[in-house]
Amino acid sequence: MIEAWIGGEKFRQGINLYIARNAWGNASFGDFAGAIDDATGGPVMEVLTSYVSQPGVPLVRVRSRCEGNATVVDLEQTRFLLGSERSPDQLWSIPVCFTDGACIVLRERTQSVRRSGCRDSVFPNDEGRGYYVTTLEPAAQTALAGGRDLSPSERMAFVRDQWLLVRAGSHSLDDYLQTATAFGNDRHVADQVLTTLGYITRHRVDGAREERLQTLLRQLATPILSDLGWSVRPGDTREDLELRNKVIELLGDHAADTATRRRGRELTNRWLRDANALSPEVVSDVARIAAIGGDAKLYAAFLKGYRTNSDPNQKLRFLSLLGAFRDPQLLRRTLQLTLTDEIRGQDLASVLAGVIGNPAGRDIAWRFLNENWSAIERKLPPGHTGRVLTALSANACDPVWQERIRQFTAEHPMPQSERAVRVAIERIGNCVELRALQGG
């Protein structure tokens, strides 16, 4: 943010000055900010101090109107908070930069700036580099959604902020779904949009919209998978590799797409016959989709793969797949395996987490943990209990699970996992509040 505001060359001059002044010595935040200040002549110390000396992230509200041949932009800052939390009386010195590169420092609660030309909409986060959340008027939001006036980085920032505003309760889920529909086929933001839609679907943030959400996921993800294909291609970027796996997972799991599940099973059967039939980068996601609708025969093939494979990576892949089935009987078999010598202590937490994170396995795993905790705790290496507790919150969106975790950890103290416990309870609480805000 600072570099984008003052310019790359001035920022480099400040860094060089900071290094020269403090070579072979200790330095503080003040030394760094002061050097940037001295090199640029700008209020960098003021801006950095306002961010470093207080918690939180600012929210910048933007309203614009035309006056003659100019656009008046009204800016207002508060602290961004989730849900029903009350905003404390905080102020930042915020470099707000517009898409043409012009910047102002927002110091007061409200400030106005006059821009030349009459514009329908103004996006106050040039290249998405500003460390703040923006909220726009409905007309401006609609004008920007799906438009190509924004750069890829700005579109990513816009879509991110729309979801954060839903989490805060100031925008509705319908608002975000309109944004997702407008931007969903944009490859630059597809991963972001699809990940959020997966979260909404997985946590049933709004049960009344579940079928609509699954349909939207299919509409957005199917063309991407058709374009990328199921196999790695020469020239694929890292983003292509990640997006391919993402859409396979979302279509086969959250969207419950029958064609994807059928294709996943076909490709998995080929892979079981020939280990080179699938690209290594997609094997786990494809086989996991097959497991979702898998039967005892497929489970037996994966278990055999775990027991007989000498490649440690392949062995762990097969082991992780045993927790992906949706058949309760098969999941119970996997859990019982964790009590045997077949599964090493260092692998135990990941197996338990896999079953717990499975929508069909969470309740089964919870009973298993309560009935067998003494044996499990003896087998788990130090510090691994946190992974199990974190998994309990991965798909939970019900206050019942908060209370279960509190009670369980009260009965079975875990000093090494106190932070994981707090994170799990907070994560569930955030989802519960989101559902309440959105009427789920």
Image (spheres, helix red, strand yellow):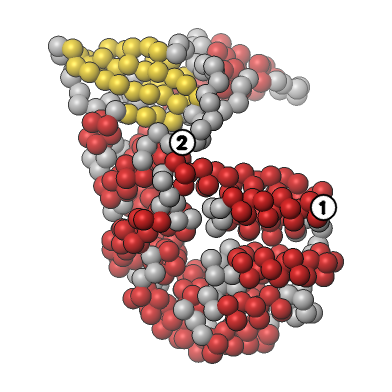
Q: Is label 2 in contact with label 1 (beta carbons under 8 Å)?
A: no
Q: In the picture, residue 174 is in which quadrant?
A: top left
Amino acid type for the residue under numbered disc 1:
Pro
Q: Does the image show residue 243?
A: yes
Left or right of 277 on screen, residue 177: left
Q: Residue at x 55, y 13 (%)?
A: 46
Instruction: Say what secondary structure mark 2 lies in.
Output: helix
- Percent from the top left, x then y, of residue 107? 46, 12
Marks 2 and 1, the one that precedes in the sequence:
2
Q: Nearer the viewer, residue 23 or 283?
A: 283
420 versus 369 height, above or below? above
Distance CA(mark 2)–CA(mark 1)? 33 Å
Left or right of 410 on screen, residue 12: left
Q: Residue at x 38, y 79 (%)?
A: 263
Instruction: Say what secondary structure mark 1 lies in.
Output: loop
Q: Residue at x 45, y 86 (%)?
A: 270
Q: Residues within 10 Å of mark 2 (few under 14, many from 20)?
A: many
75 versus 348 height, above or below? above
Mark drawn on residue 168:
2
Q: In the picture, residue 248 is in which quadrant?
A: bottom left
Mark drawn on residue 230:
none
- Percent from the top left, x then y, of residue 133? 44, 30
Identify the residue under disc 1.
413
- Percent from the top left, x then y, of residue 15? 58, 23
114 versus 387 height, above or below? above
Q: Does the image show residue 148?
A: no
